[in-house]
Amino acid sequence: MSWTVKPSRTQKIESRTEPYLTEEAKAKYEKDLIPRYPERRGALLPILHDLQHHERCVSHQAMVEVAQFLQITPGEVLDTVSFYEEFHVEPVGRHVVAVCQSVACEACGHAAVLDHLKDKLGIDEHETTPDGKITLLALECLGACEKAPCMLRNDELVGPLTPDQAARLVDELE
């Protein structure tokens, strides 16, 4: 069997005229973040978290800008972004609901919670509602087995949950 490769030569990378890393952001990182690490690359995760929070994604253009700022390769930034589930290269909804699907949550009924939310929102996991309001994710483990089944509602960990409780929590999102 042969390997099929992606046509990377013809791939178009969306870009915008204004930078993701503004001069103000760079100055803030230089003052508050870079000194906390023995090497500049140590600030990679905090900068990516900041971008994900403000832009709702870490675009390819942003990855190149971060690489230049930290004096590392864009590949190193891409490796990090693609490794962690909380980073997205496409914008997520204004709210992110992430249902845990660890072994403990599976044993306690995470599938019913996830299925109920998929039906309620009319989307599948790793999709965003048409209005851009909510992205529904299924993540491997949230590290809260004592709250199984649980989910993240934006940055808030909630659980244990029934399907109806999960739906009510989603309804509360503006």
Image (cartoon, rainbow, N blue to C red):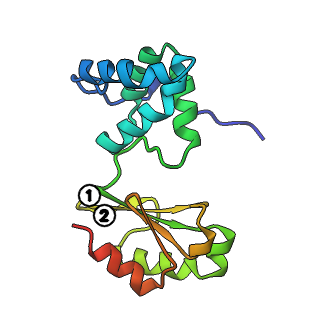
Relative image position of residue 165 (x, y in whole percent): 40, 83
Identify the residue at the far right of this view.
1
Looking at the picture, which amino acid does disc 2 mark? Thr
The picture quadrant where one finds residue 52 is: top left
Residue depicted at 49% across the width and 26% down the height: 43
Which quadrant of the figure contains the N terminus? top right
Residue 14, given in percent of the width and then of the height, sits at 33, 30
Q: Mark 2 points at which residue?
A: 129
Across and down, in percent, residue 88 comes to 44, 44
Please tell me which residue is depicted at 33% across the width and 73% down the height of the picture.
170
Q: Can residue 99 be seen in this view?
A: yes
Secondary structure beneath disc 2?
A: loop
Q: Residue 106, located in which quarter of the rendered image?
A: bottom right
Estimate how packed mark 2 is, as few (under 14), some (14 to 19) or many (20 or more) residues with alpha carbons within 10 Å: some
Amino acid at circle 1: Gly
Callout 1 crowding tier (Cα within 10 Å): few <14, some 14–19, many ≥20: few
Label ID, residue 102: none
Picture quadrant where residue 53 is located? top left
CB contact under 8 Å: marks 2 and 1: yes
- Give the side of residue 154 with respect to residue 17, left or right: right
State left or right for residue 88 relative to residue 103: left
- Horizontally, residue 99 falls left or right of residue 28, namely right
Q: Mark 1 points at which residue?
A: 132
Q: Is residue 105 above or below residue 28?
A: below
Which residue is depicted at the point 51% across and 37% down?
A: 81
Q: Nearer the viewer, residue 170 or 59?
A: 170
Where 108 sits versus 75, above or below? Answer: below
Q: Which residue is drawn at 59% across and 41% down?
A: 83
Residue 135 or residue 24, whichever sits in front: 24
